[in-house]
Image (cartoon, rainbow, N blue to C red):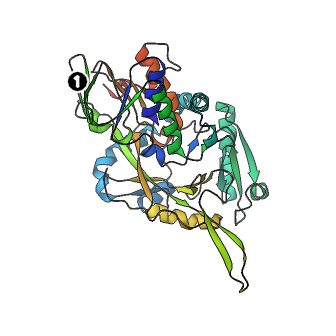
Amino acid sequence: MVGTCTALHLAQRGHSVALVDRGAPGGETSYGNSGIIQREAVEPYAFPRDWASLLNVAFKRGMDVNYHFGALPSVLPHLARYWQASGPSRYPLIAAEFSRLIEHSISENASLIAQAGADDLIRRTGYRTVFRTAKAFDQAAEKAQRLALQYGVQHALLDGAALAEAEPALRNSLAGAVHWLDPWSVNDPGALVARYAALFTANNGRFVRGDATSLQPMGKGWRVVTQDGPLEAQHAVIALGPWAETVTRPLGYRLPLFVKRGYHRHYSAVVHRGAANNGAFASESTSGTSPLSIPLLDAERGLVLAPMSRGLRITTGAEFARMGAPSTPVQLYKAEVAARELIDLPPAIEAEPWMGNRPCTSDMKPVIGPAPRHPGLWFNFGHAHQGFTLGAVSGRLLADLLDGKVPLIDAAPYSAGRFGG
């Protein structure tokens, strides 16, 4: 999403742009998320600081976080900086700076959605965060009121009865829900990126298969190897998400980047057509339907259930592992158990869960802007859980900076220079 939107904004401004990737746009991280443009996500995910949460993570008691022991030596220094950035002295400023990007997430996507003819993929009905216990619901309601006052985020509070009426498929009585009204949801995240990519090519952009890790300075510009031969340009934008470090590190940059993995799986609905003479029911699998009307975040278990064009998608929390390490979808299996406590979970479509990687920084803010030591090189990565939400606004911001225009918002908080060059 981030790379495609960046290429699209630059092409729409008249630049000659080639989008170089090893696969089709929207086939990696942006394909696998919960499909929510999270206008309410004005405060990034902070590192937990209470002992109960830390112990749950350490002993893998919950399903929101998992880790590989072999990954800890490389990731712990980044997590230590993440923990420091989440402290009371730093986090409020980080959240304020992060919120300025989020503020434009809907408006920037709205423009591109209209131009790309992608309205059929969009729901403008928000999503719900549900709570199983009254204590958690009361705390969330208090936070929602604070976010409304501080950032203008709109929401509605539903008690257990109102939630049951809104989502009849819920099996058990829950304490309540926060219905976030501003976000939009997408029934096929990969398809939305593909529509943006089609709009990019309609604006004279070129899509080229190639290996971004071959990027090298060449004279006063940049050179990358593609299937069509070497490609040279005055400017190069690294928008590689979790793979950004494979290019930035050989160029001498030591940015505090790390990866969180995540999983998803689709579940198709089963519709009973009626009783046969022997009393047995005939059934028919109908992928594309969902027992829920809008996405639902089970806050106390750490999973999202999102209606998609292929059925119901369950997405998980974070897993810390080395890039390329074998899949360990224990969170997804735990999420299936939790989902069955909420709804009659339909059968899984895929034999194996999908796995993807989220690109993170230790201070929770993306890296957007010029490379400190290489003229003509630009960075746009590190969006963590919000690359899908922030792709459109990040692409516009990068294009503003490259064109030397007054940017949509102050870009200084996202500069790579904040890490010391």
Q: Is residue 128 left or right of residue 242?
A: right
Q: Position of residue 257 (x, y in %)?
A: 35, 39
The part of the image, by quadrant, that contains residue 274 is: bottom right
Q: Is residue 269 left or right of residue 88?
A: right
At a point 47% along the width and 34% down the height, the residue shown is: 197
Q: Quadrant of the C terminus?
A: top left
Q: Position of residue 5 (x, y in %)?
A: 47, 30
Front-lying residue, 120 or 124: 120
Q: Position of residue 54 (x, y in %)?
A: 46, 55
Total numbered circles: 1
Tell me the element at label 1: strand
The extreme bottom residue here reads: 278
Q: Position of residue 381 (x, y in %)?
A: 40, 34
Q: Which residue is mark 1?
A: 217
Residue 254 position (above or below residue 276): above
Residue 90 seen in this snapshot: no
Residue 262 seen in this snapshot: yes
Residue 380 position (above or below residue 46): above
Front-lying residue, 47 or 269: 269
Front-lying residue, 44 or 118: 118
Q: Please, what is the three-letter code of the amino acid marked with disc 1?
A: Pro
* Category of crowding for the residue at label 1, using alpha-carbon neighbours closer than 10 angstroms: few (below 14), some (14–19), many (at least 20): some
Q: Is residue 110 left or right of residue 263?
A: right
